[in-house]
Amino acid sequence: MKQITTFHPALRIIHWLMAAAIMAMLFIGVAMVSTVSTLHGLLVAIHKPLGLMILVLVIVRLWLRFTTATPALPATLPAWQKLSAHLSHWALYAMMLAQPLIGWAMLSAGGYPITLGHLVLPPIVPVSNDAFAVLRPLHSWVALALFMTVMLHLAAALFHALILRDGVFSSMTVSRKRLAPGALDNPADGQ
């Protein structure tokens, strides 16, 4: 049986598309809440559809994750690092799914419609000042937790790519079949 060394191409594309969208979303969110200029309306107009795009992409990504084979982590990784990798990935999935839903619920509770052109999305919670008062800071806290987890994920990815060179990073980038032998990975690791 052939060992899988890379994620499905669709998963790799969605991963990098979501990485760019999430980073843009986090910075747009910070700029949005820190400005009252005319730029605020433009940022909000970008933030809402981008959040919905992320929600759709994470649902597709989770479906692909459960329906396609994934490469195993290197046997050389200690058990605690494998557990940390799995837990951090599930935390990322949970936050990527929860954050747009919290934002949608927050806007619904505040009585603010979400529109995409002429399409008005239905509210997912009833209008409620109390709910809005809970959801507004929750949206910020989840954004901060997501940002910190993404930064840890990036640090781990760079550690695997530049220090360990164990194939973990390249499993989410390009197919190894197209690379020269040893181009990204340590030839001594047996892969």
Image (tube, rainbow, N blue to C red):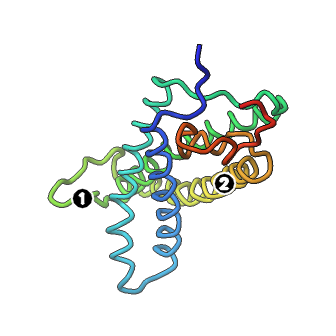
Q: Nearer the viewer, mark 1 or mark 2?
A: 2
In this view of the protein, which residue sits in the foreground, 104 or 129? 104
Residue marked by disc 1? 115
Residue 155: image quadrant is bottom right
Numbered circle sitting on residue 26: none
- The single residue placed furthest to the bottom in the displayed view is 37
Q: Position of residue 34 (x, y in %)?
A: 52, 78
For the point 60% across and 53% down, the residue is 146
Q: CA distance from mark 1 to mark 2?
A: 33 Å
Rendered-image quadrant of the C terminus: top right
For the point 39% across and 78% down, the residue is 40
Q: Position of residue 59 (x, y in %)?
A: 41, 37
In this view of the protein, which residue sits in the foreground, 124 or 10? 10
The tag earlier along the polypeptide, 1 or 2, is: 1
Circle 2: residue type:
Leu
Q: Is residue 57 left or right of residue 152?
A: left
For the point 49% across and 42% down, the residue is 12
- The single residue placed furthest to the top in the displayed view is 1
In this view of the protein, which residue sits in the foreground, 174 or 110? 174
Residue marked by disc 2? 154
For the point 76% across and 51% down, the residue is 159
Circle 1: residue type:
Thr
Q: Is residue 78 left or right of residue 12?
A: right
